[in-house]
Amino acid sequence: MSEFDAIVVGAGPAGTSAASKMASSGLNVLLVERGDPPGSKSVSGGILWGRELSNLYPDWEKSAPLERFISNKVTGFLTEDSYVGIDFKTKKFEREKTGYSVLRTRLDGWMAKKAKEAGATVITGITVDGLAWEDKKVVGIRQADDTITSDVVVLAEGANPRVAIDEGLRAPISDKDVAIGIKQVVKLSEQTINERFNLRNGAGLAAEFSLGFLKNGVMAGGFLYTNKDTISAGVVIDIAGLRKDNKTYSFDIMDQFINHPYIAPYLENGQLQEYSAHLVCEGGINYVPKLYGNGYVIAGDSAGLSFSNGMVIQGMNYAIASGISAAKAAVKCKEKGHYGESDLAYYDELMQHSQAIEDMRKFKGITGVTWSPMIHEFLPKFAENVLHDMFYETGEPKKHLFEIAMENLIGSRYDKKKLLLESYRMMRKM
Ligand SMILES: Cc1cc2nc3c(=O)[nH]c(=O)nc-3n(C[C@H](O)[C@H](O)[C@H](O)COP(=O)(O)OP(=O)(O)OC[C@H]3O[C@@H](n4cnc5c(N)ncnc54)[C@H](O)[C@@H]3O)c2cc1C
């Protein structure tokens, strides 16, 4: 007889959702988190998109530690001298509340508390070393010399899933599957943030930028998200390019972003509260492993369930959804009294029809666009030059926009065949 019905490894959104759902359905659950408190090891941008939490807690918008609802979405291009952006504001987001900025130190703590209230046992400050096996079935977890047994283990370790990899349950990570994320949380007063970003009544901004000022083929995106009285500012860097150019360091890219002439004023006189780094899952559908086996399931980032198209990163919502689905499968197994591979296949069945997997299938190969030199090198410079030439009054006869655009296109050193191919790919994949 096992000590627990289920053990969950990791108290991120995937793990806490799974633990909460299983415990509230009557399972005896242990949730193990290496950080103490939960959230202390977590990094996310972070905008919580979607409404997955309502499937766990109907009153989540009143009780969860949400910072601001997103009313303003910016997609921008930065060059050394310029900023070009699409600035989308809508009252519709105010009514729909489709995204909230969150701070993971607070959100993870709240979600772990909810799992505990639902009846799960939560232990923190413990790193799970591996799994315990018996007759080719996972029967629990190992930590130092101890084994704790359970009928099922939910692996929700995040983007660096050491246990799943070491136990041979998923492929190791390669450069193309992950990016490096670096993030700062900068303290400013609520009033200053409202004034600088032109925000009112709890509204917030989520902005993503392509960093067109980087050299030597290094590619990165930047983000600025407003919280109540802090700003989350960070970069997400393509590892392959960074590895090729061994003169650029990830922290330099972060410094260049926050000191950019059109970013720095937003953060001016702010006080640095947090500085963190983390892997970001970018591998897409091909990076998703088999989600279940004899006595275990894999959820959230550990299963590569994350989406990015350069204008938005989503992972927390997929993590919550997959945690809930993993829990549903475990509850069904408990009812049957059997947690074999074919029983846990129900988790896979749920996930194959989920938004997460459908999105990832549909946007297969999107990283070929998000990490293309066209987005990070050609477009920022091209947009800057065209707009500059359009608005710069020379006293000479004016040119049509088409003429200006063609001159800049022909004048650009960017390979035109490559540009055509990449543009076509962008239209198809975006
Ligand atoms: C810079 C950055 C920006 C991002 N921006 C966004 C965004 O704006 N919106 C969005 O939706 N997503 C965003 N993401 C992605 C999002 O953070 C992840 O998809 C999400 O956190 C995945 O949740 P998870 O529960 O699977 O994993 P995690 O949140 O990583 O949680 C895993 C937990 O497991 C614990 N753990 C790991 N190994 C062990 C072990 N062996 N024993 C015990 N505990 C262990 C960790 O300490 C951690 O608490 C961003 C990610 C990064 C890095």
Image (cartoon, rainbow, N blue to C red):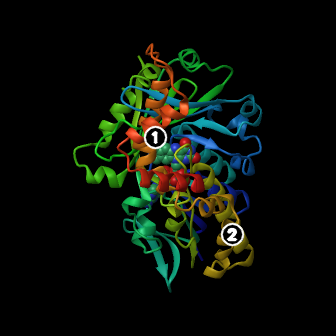
Image coords of residue 412 (percent x, y): 38, 40
User: Split into 4 quadrants, where in the image is the N terminus?
Assistant: bottom right
Image coords of residue 227 (percent x, y): 56, 29
Name the mark on residue 329: 2
> Is the CB of mark 1 within 8 Å of ligand 1?
no
Image coords of residue 338 (percent x, y): 67, 79
Q: Amino acid at mark 2?
A: Ala
Q: Amino acid at mark 1?
A: Leu
Q: How many marks?
A: 2
What crowding class fits label 1: few (fewer than 14 Cα within 10 Å), some (14-19), or many (20 or more)? Answer: some
- Rendered residue at 54%/34% (across/down): 402
In the rendered view, tell whether residue 103 sits above or below residue 171: above
Image coords of residue 354 (percent x, y): 69, 62
- Rendered residue at 49%/18% (across/down): 397
Q: Residue beneath label 1, please? A: 379
- Is residue 196 visible in this depiction of the protein? yes
Name the mark on residue 185: none
- Is residue 36 visible in this depiction of the protein? no
Q: Is residue 240 left or right of residue 424?
A: left
Examine the image and state in which quarter residue 49 appears: top right
Q: Secondary structure at mark 2?
A: helix
